[in-house]
Amino acid sequence: MAFELFTMKSARSGREARVTVSKRGSLSLNTVCMASHFKDAEYVQLLYDAQSKRIAIKPATAGDEHTYKICRGKQGGGHVSGQGFLKYYKIPHDKTRSCPALWDKRLAALVVDLKKK
């Protein structure tokens, strides 16, 4: 077996907003997402565009309808229990995957493109 040189091309930057969809059904927002868009939010609303295969995560308040509580981690990230959401829309989550996320000003939401890695 031959050794292969690690070139860091596959390493992800800690400055890129990413959301991980876990096989257990949670949506994890990295520290970039939390610090940039959810630092004051305690709840979110989850939206789905089936045609483009994108999830939108929108900051919300406790009084808003259909909200999910953000569980904050010690390292600055956060996660939302989205198993019912993923099952309802038949979003595959048989294996954990990390996807890029971009802020959509018009929606005032973080948009996760499930087609990209």
Image (cartoon, rainbow, N blue to C red):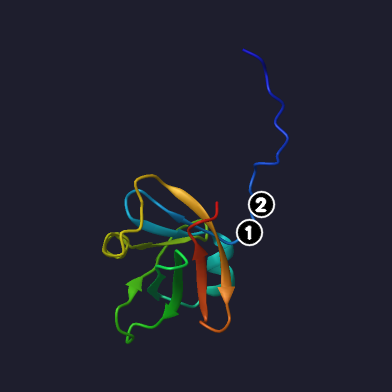
Q: In the image, 109: left or right of 86?
A: right
Residue drawn where x is 26% and y is 64% of the image: 88
**Residue 98's mark?**
none
**Residue 39 visible to the viewer:** no
Q: Position of residue 9 (x, y in %)?
A: 70, 41
Query: Which residue in the rendered view is the most extreme toward the front?
Result: 51
Q: Position of residue 38 (x, y in %)?
A: 50, 73
Q: Looking at numbered disc 1 in the image, what kind of residue is underneath it?
A: Glu
Q: For residue 105, which quarter of the picture?
A: bottom right
Residue drawn where x is 45% and y is 76% of the image: 58
Q: Nearer the viewer, residue 25 or 60?
A: 25
Q: Which residue is mark 2?
A: 13
- State if disc 1 and disc 2 touch (CB < 8 Å): yes
Q: Which residue is mark 1?
A: 16
Determine the secondary structure under disc 2.
loop
Q: In the image, 61: left or right of 99?
A: left
Q: Nearer the viewer, residue 69 or 106?
A: 106
